[in-house]
Amino acid sequence: MKLHMPVRMFSGDSVVSDHAALFEAFGSRCALVTGKGAAVKSGALADVTAVLERCGISFCVFDGIEQNPSVRSCIAAGQCAHAFGAAFVVGIGGGSALDAAKAAAVFAANPGLDEEGFYRKAWENSPLPLLLVGTTAGTGSEVTKVSVLTDSRGRKHSIHDDRLFAAASFGDPKYTAALPLSVTLSTGIDVLCHCAESWFNRNADELSRAYALQGIRLLFPPLQQAAEGRDLGHGERAALYDASLLGGLAICETGTCFPHNVGYYLTETRKVPHGFASACFLPALLDITQEKNPACADRFFRELGIARGELLRLISLCLPETGISMTAEEIDAALPRWENNNSVRNTCCEVSPAEIREILCALFLKN
């Protein structure tokens, strides 16, 4: 078993205001990296700025991070932080803002670094110290060394590097209360994908599988409650948040499988939210594993304590009707992207581009 987790993670009520001393430890000037909505609506931006003002820390705000953040926006955020003379970066928001803050910390410390150099990890200087404040129960970016960004060609790529770990992360479940139902479902189903893909991963060990199973057990009741249109209380939101952290810990050790990378294609071409896009292919992961390695699939459901039919029902409840259709020509043109792809190779059973074609055809091929 292996575990490398340098992040100091704090979750629970009032964790930002209760740990003001941590912010003070990183310097007297910082850059806040956020989107335009979640940081404000959740109350997280107000809590962070109140702590900074109380500690006498000057700050600038870059709020230009979009959903599925672009490298271009991250470069701009890094330039803003560098021009301000920031000693550290604070990312506030959902997975998009947190992933972007990781990249911004790299660009702030390396003025002039371009997209190509970023992906080659040609970083002369280490990223600025990073603090993260999450506002969704989804990506688990708070505890990972991963940043998923959209390049200048419109393609999503993940970059993994130990230097992208935050120094500290904060998760207060109250920040998720302002989320619309669609975001709660999309981020919640993303947690399910993280946990399941980590469990059915060639890199999985007993520790990562323990994280994954407990994450699914925690999220199942509140996610089902939300999918059935019932309101979530603070306890349910706390369970979802803890599940998202467990999912983050799991994929940090293993990476993801083919549903995530094939899901990127739906996000790029059809603007399907990331969690929903990945979850479209989660039933196929369960089917392939059941067919090729039934012992592995049976162990998963036995140890999980949730029946296969119940899990499939939850996925179906969460997924919206997308109305997506594809031609055979489009599907064939996309297949090269999954040849020798790390996430596809990580799947515990071999999955060929031809099998991915079959999955896409079954789901989306025009009649």
Image (cartoon, rainbow, N blue to C red):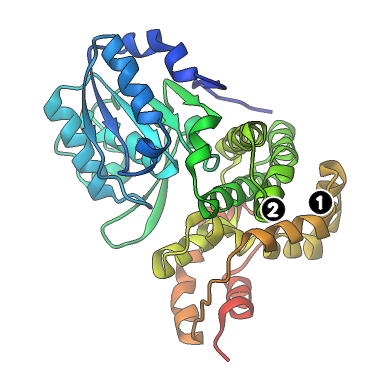
Q: Residue furthest left?
A: 83
Q: Is residue 51 above or below residue 199?
A: above
Tell me which residue sits at (32%, 50%) in the image: 66
For the residue pair 248 and 35, the one nearer the viewer reads as 35
Q: Mark 2 and mark 1 in contact? Answer it, CB < 8 Å.
A: yes
- Which badge, 2 or 1, is on the more N-terminal residue? 1
Tell me which residue sits at (28%, 48%) in the image: 71
10 Å crowding of disc 1: few (<14), some (14-19), many (20+): some
Residue 87: image quadrant is: top left
Tell me which residue sits at (40%, 69%) in the image: 269
Residue 360: in sight, yes or no?
A: yes
Disc 2 residue type? Cys
Residue 280: image quadrant is: bottom right
Q: Residue furthest bottom?
A: 367
| Label 2 secondary element | loop
Q: Is residue 67 above or below residue 85?
A: below
Q: Position of residue 144 (x, y in %)?
A: 50, 34
For the residue pair 222 and 197, the one nearer the viewer reads as 222
Q: Is residue 66 left or right of residue 233?
A: left
**Quarter placement of the C terminus:** bottom right
For label 1, the residue is 296
Disc 1 residue type? Cys
For label 2, the residue is 348
Tally of marks: 2
| Label 1 secondary element | helix
Q: Is residue 167 left or right of residue 361?
A: left
Q: Position of residue 223 (x, y in %)?
A: 67, 47
Q: Position of residue 74 (x, y in %)?
A: 26, 42
